[in-house]
Amino acid sequence: MDQASDHPDPNWTILFVCWLLVTAATLGSLFFSEVMGLPPCSLCWYQRIFMFPLPILLLMGLFPLDAKVVRYALPLALAGWAIAAYHTLLQLGVIPETAAPCSQGVSCSSAYLELFGFVSIPVLSLLAFSSAVGLLILLSRRLAR
Amino acid sequence: MKKQHIAFLGAAGLMLAFVIAGLLYKGQRAEELGSMAQSSGAPFLREHAPSMGPADAKVIIVEFFDPACETCRVFAPKVKSLLSQHAGKVRLVLRYAPLHQGSDTMVKILEAARMQGKYWKTLQVMFDTQPEWASHHRPQPDKIWAFLPSTGLDVEAVRRDLNDPRILEIVRQDIADAKTLGVRKTPEFFVNGKPLPSFGLTQLQELVAAEVKANY
């Protein structure tokens, strides 16, 4: 096997870190729903729809390193980011509750979990999507050079 | 290190973290519930809660349920057969977790039926007719009234008692206790304050058998 492609280079490492991140976010989300038994609200489900494909998609892009992966993964990450941002604003009360799309079942605007007093689940989601978007853009810039 | 090895380690690390976090969480929850079970019985047991089986039974199954919950309906006869299987040793205490919209009305009807001494009969009819009044998890409380006369209840009295302050207090207390105990799904069982290791009939049967063995 080719020695050069067998060992990590900076581009591969960036994508790998991004993969670790989205995989941790996916497992974390499953932890909240399956282990802790917190029911996901509808906005959470939309974020999951965009987050859950990323671990598989990025893994395919890692072996072998495929520059095109950014083209496929970035739109998903951006869509997820937008919903996470909306959800965070909703929970912070910046967007009024009446604008919330959830009328039945689980409320999107009530916080079920707060770490350190301000990190709620939508904030965690927003952090994960932001870092994924950042790393994917960084990677595409490097690859374009 | 090769890429494949790094990726494998990363994946294994994340999976391991997930499993460890799960075990820690379950351990912590069992500990919390255990310390609550040591006290007078609340928030598991309340004076007002309807119960079945001998008062001096040393094994108490606390079931948080919702009359509109299909799984609760399926479990009801199985839990009763657990009582007869360990006759004289096990008591069932029912608590309410009305998670569906509209199921609080069902709970109030049950409590009004209890005032007339027809609790278990009414619960049976409610579960039997559940597909009629709560199809697809959408309870339509108005539909239950047609089935109530078959229980022999004074239906007019039920309507009158529905908003009795004592009943409202029972519902309020049960919802508060369900929240304290972290009940988010129904049915949720606690056997002598211990939660099921994972949800399932077999797990319930095993936990009850283990508690009977430990206490008799």
Image (cartoon, rainbow, N blue to C red):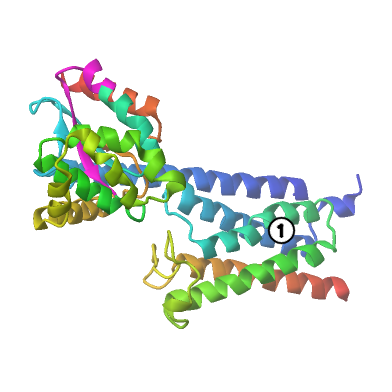
Q: Nearer the viewer, residue B3 or B46?
A: B46
Residue B94 or residue B162, whichever sits in front: B162
In the figure, A130 relative to B199: above or below? Answer: below
Residue B4 placement (x, y as % from top left): 76, 46
Tell whether B191 sits left or right of A72. Answer: left
Q: Residue A81 lies in what quarter of the image?
A: bottom right
Q: Name the amino acid type tagged 1.
A: Phe
Crowding at dot 1, Cα within 10 Å, few <14 / some 14-19 / many 20+, comes out as many
What is the chain identity of the residue bearing mark 1? A
Q: Secondary structure at mark 1?
A: helix
Find residue B31 and report its horizontal and vertical position in percent: 27, 43
**Relative depth, front residue between A67 and A126:** A126
Nearer to the camera, A69 or A13: A69
Q: Is residue B69 above or below residue A23?
A: above
- The residue sitting at the bottom extreme is A94
Residue at image coords 56%, 52%: A27
Image x and y of residue B155, in percent:
17, 45
| In the image, residue B96 lies in the stretch drawn in magenta | yes
Residue receiving disc 1: A16
Q: Residue at x 74, y 62 (%)?
A: A15
Lateral position of residue B107 relative to residue A54, left or right? left
Look at the image and say whether residue B114 sits in the magenta stretch: no
Can residue B207 be seen from the camera position used here?
Answer: no
To which quarter of the image does residue A52 belong? bottom right
- Residue positioned 80% across, 56% down in the render: A61
* Count of numbered tags: 1
Q: Along the horizontal axis of the image, is A36 left or right of B80?
A: right
Task: Give coordinates of residue B30: x percent, y percent.
Answer: 30, 42
**Toward which corner of the image does residue B57 lie, by quadrant?**
top left
- In magenta, the rendered stretch is B81-97
**Is residue A94 in sight in this rendering?**
yes
